[in-house]
Structures are given as structure tokens and as C-alpha cells.
Image (spheres, helix red, strand yellow):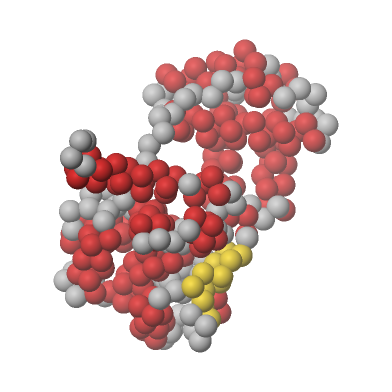
Amino acid sequence: MELQAAIDAFVAQLRRQNASPQTIRAYQNDLVQLLEFLSPPGEAPPSPERIDLLILREWVASLYHAKLSNVSMRRKIAAVRALWKFLLREGIVSKDVPKLLTLPKIAKTLPAVPSAENVNTLLDRIAEGILARPTLRRDIAIFELLYGCGVRVSELVGLRLGDIQWKDRLILVRGKGRKERLVPCTQKVLDALKAWVAERSAGVTVDQIFVSEKGEPLSDRSVRRVVELYAKSLSALEGMHPHTLRHSFATHLLREGADLRSIQELLGHAQLSTTQKYTQVNLTDLMAIYDKAHPRA
């Protein structure tokens, strides 16, 4: 099997497994870049069975030469490893060559989380309509959902009208791998959604809750631009993005006494270890308080 055909078969398998569009796009882009590296002008790339460790190390060296971050390189290597695992199961290759590649190390960094006061001040200023945007009610609903429910941006743009259980104050969220979970929401979230849904209803034919001025579903990138616009214009929270609000949601819940298992369920994490990073953030705050307050510190 040719490498291009192998990639196509792997991507088709991801679609059959209901992988998220973002996951499929990321794998496809990374594997196409490998294909391009192995396709010099006038030559066909080697078949997967002929790709050995030396060839893959040369590809990794090209990533270093391109000055990619270690995080990006780890993601690309992970994509190649996933492809080979698929090819092994299908009997197309006999050796798991990418497994022998060494992953670049990355520094463990804690997510930067603004204080609850700063986030609430930003949300209050947005609601005041200082920017006077025509989509103000939509933008308010976006911020209230991201911070009030801790949803991922991909989950937010995928929300449909039927996903809101108004009476029970619950929202049906479709997370990674198409896994569904019910997330409780505050009255502020519901009020913001009601105001936006009432405004968007005229002339909109799609079922997605969040749409553009033209009535088209919003993309992840559009939501990121909305968040960045308000953060830069109305606060000193530089570098804020939708995931910042998700981090804030989890960290602020933990600070107020919520247990990790509950936060895990709310965030839709498959593993508790993923949620435990918020414990590290909380401990960092505790250490700062300790160093400042203890007479022997």
C-alpha cells in the first residue's frame, strides 16, 4: 500500500470511530506533512513497510531544523505512531518503527488562571455594552457559557437548540470522541442564552445556537477572536482564550471546595489525572499565601 492510501485509510477509520473534526484535521495535517517530506521532486514516497527508523529520524531532524516547539513535534510524532498502530492492526506493516522514536521533552507548566474577581469584572463590563457590537447578546452568552459551564470551544460551537434543558437547568454537551455529558448551568447562563436565542431566531435556518451575523454556524476560530477582542479591549488579561475560561472554571470551583471527581465530571475528562493539574494550581496559590503569612517563612 502506498503511503497516501495508508493515510486515507487511517483518516477514514477515525471518521468511522466518530473522532472529533479537530482530531481528524490535526492527524491529517501532520501526516500529510510527513508525506510531503518523503516526496522529493520527481520521486514517489516509500511505502510504509519500507520506512525505517533512519528515515523517520531524518524527518524528526527536519522538524528541529524548522524550529518547531517540542509540543508540536510531540504531536506530529504521536500522529505517526497512531498511523503505524492502525497499519499494524491491518497487517500492512510488520514492525512498529515510530515506537522507537524519542519524544522531545517538554517543561511542565501550569495554566495561567485569572482571579475570579478579574473574570467577573470582565463579564460585567461586556454586559454593559461598552464595545457596542451588534452581536452583543451572543457574545455575552459565549462568555457566560465558557466560564459558567467550563465547556471546550469545540463543544460550545456544536451546541444546538435542543441541547438546552431549560426547566432542569442542564445542557447536553458533546465532548471528545462524541461522548455526551449533562452539565448544570447557572441562572446567569440560562438568562444569557435565552436573550441570545430570542434575538437569533429570525431568519436563521441552522440548528446551531451560536451563529454569525449572516446566520452561519460559528467556528472555533471565530469564538477565539471574540474572546481575544473583549479581553484586550476591556481588561488587562493578556493572552486570554476560550480555554483560559475553562481553566478558570475548574480552578475557581476547586478553591471554593468542590472535589476533584465532581470537577472531572463537569469538564468531561476521561482520566482523573488530567483534572489533577488544577490541584497543582491551587497548591501554588497556597504556597504563595504560606510564604507571605507564616512568621517563619
Task: Single out the residue that lies furthest toward the right.
Answer: 91
The quarter of the displayed image where residue 2 is located: top right
Spot occupied by residue 53 in the image (x, y as percentages of width and height): 65, 16
Residue drawn at x 26%, y 56% as measured from the top left: 115
Spot occupied by residue 215 in the image (x, y as percentages of width and height): 42, 74
Spot occupied by residue 291 in the image (x, y as percentages of width and height): 22, 39
Task: Single out the residue that lies furthest toward the top.
Answer: 54
**Vertical arrangement, residue 39 with respect to residue 124, above or below:** above
Residue drawn at x 42%, y 19% as measured from the top left: 65
- Name the side, left or right, on which 106 lies relative to 52: left
Residue drawn at x 22%, y 60% as measured from the top left: 118
The answer to whether residue 207 is visible is: no
The residue closer to the viewer here, 282 or 63, is 282
The quarter of the displayed image where residue 84 is located: top right
**Vertical arrangement, residue 289 with respect to residue 51, above or below:** below
The residue closer to the viewer here, 182 or 25, is 182
**Vertical arrangement, residue 69 with respect to residue 174, above or below:** above
Residue drawn at x 19%, y 45% as measured from the top left: 293
The answer to whether residue 14 is visible is: yes
Point out the image quarter for the N terminus. top right
In the rendered picture of this protein, how many numbered marks are placed on residues? Answer: 0
